[in-house]
Image: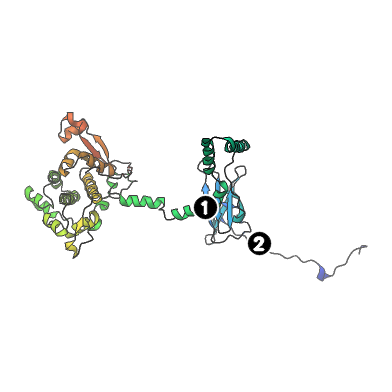
Amino acid sequence: MAKGGVKRSREEEPSTISSKSHTTELKVTSFTEEPVAVVGSFFQGLQVPHTTEFDLYHHKKRSDKYVIHGENDHLNYDGETNPEETNDYVLALYDPIKKSLDLYKSPFIQGKVQAKSKRIYKGPSVRQAGVRNITQRNALGEAFGTKKAKAAITNLERNRIDSEKLQDIELDIIDTVKVSTQDLPTRAKMEEMVTHDRPTPVANVDATNVEDIYGLYDIIPKKEWSFLRVSSLFNESDESKTIELLPYSNSNYINKHLTNILAQKNTEKLQLLFYASLLFGVYENRRIKDKQSLMLKLQNKPSEILIDGILERFTIARSSAVGKSKDRSYLIDPHHEDKLLCYLLAIIFHIDNFMVEIPPLANELNMKPTRLLGLFKALGAIIKSATVGQAEAFGIAKSAASTYKIASLKVPFKLPEMSRRMGGKR
């Protein structure tokens, strides 16, 4: 044994413990560049009360700038990103079942926490130069000035804003604004209300085919289609008697199209024509106030299910109405009148292959062409003068083509903004 050495017993010899390292492979399934969260420095080791509400703001012009603000009864939490520092932080969401990670790029916000009692009110910087001179000048004016000059100085002092007093009421103003605006509808809710208020059928703005802009089931509910029974119209050989089978037989538009549709054996278009005839009849008798009288005017030809559907969508039930559903009393106000006409025009678009002559239709509905133009525009139709070729096809003089208006639907479709009165002046 060497001098100064230490002898160890076998028990004291160090033992080597072998261990197996266990590793788990994690799979990254996605990486999102667009931030969906931020990393705040003031959350490190800090317990934030559950009552604290945070708002995150993104600068419109600078995509890398974020500002956060939160507060509760006692503390304010404020922070913002530093453009001079890199913000390459990534938030990882771990899925223990799939053993995978979803990564989200997250900006880093340098934050600070401050007690509300220590809050410093920052007002706009005020230029102090000349303040002493103004004070001296006012003092001289008060001592030696005329009555008019003294009155001007008094009014100036009376109207001077006391910034210290404003500091005391600043928080009260903010709280009042929050209370006053908390019940205001959100943008999404307002858009939903506007969509619900439109007098037109629901439009498919993403339609790639013109017939899909206003789908047939969005105009006539699917459950009512089975009650559009038109087989008897195909079986009748006498044209005048065929017209009498329709709910409303005094429509030039319906009578003009009936022969061609029967010759084509087009059941779907005949069903549309039947329903259009029904809407023409309801519009013609829009001053009637009860269901039974309307059924009599339509000679009980349409199914009662169809009538109930029309009254449900295009009328207002009168509050004074008492009795069974067959005695239903109703009213067609201006909004529901526009709605009925818009649905009728949507059907006419389908019948006329999405190109409609406006003058004869305005004449039949006994309304000014300007009002009918407004209804077509509400549907998103394009209004143009007839071309020479169209004038020849419609049987009008070429000289009148420039004033003869045609409404058409096309894709891509843009839903128009809803004006206050879609139909214009009645």
Seen from the viewer's position, the closer of residues 338 and 389 is 338
Residue occupying the point 53% across, 40% down: 156
Which quadrant would the C terminus be assigned to in this image?
A: top left
156 sits left or right of 316 in the view: right
Residue occupying the point 90% across, 63% down: 5
Which quadrant would the N terminus be assigned to in this image?
A: bottom right
Query: Residue 325 location in percent, x, y?
Result: 19, 63
Seen from the viewer's position, the closer of residues 273 and 61 is 61
Query: Residue 13 location in percent, x, y?
Result: 81, 67
Name the residue furthest top: 399
Residues at marks 2 and 1, CA–CA distance in whole angstroms: 44 Å
* Mark 2 or mark 1, earlier in chain: 2
Query: Residue 306 location in percent, x, y?
Result: 19, 57
Numbered circles on residues, count: 2
Residue type marked 2: Ser
User: Cβ–Cβ below 8 Å for labels 2 and 1?
Assistant: no
Seen from the viewer's position, the closer of residues 377 and 14 is 377
Residue 357 shows up from this direction: no
The colour scheme is rainbow
Residue occupying the point 23% across, 53% down: 314
Q: Residues within 10 Å of mark 1 (few under 14, many from 20)?
A: few
Residue type marked 1: Asp
Helix, strand or loop for disc 2: loop
Residue 50 in the image: above or below residue 129: below
Q: Which residue is mark 1?
A: 55
426 sits left or right of 113 in the view: left
177 sits left or right of 406 in the view: right
Helix, strand or loop for disc 1: strand
Query: Residue 267 location in percent, x, y?
Result: 18, 51
Q: Which mark is residue 21?
A: 2
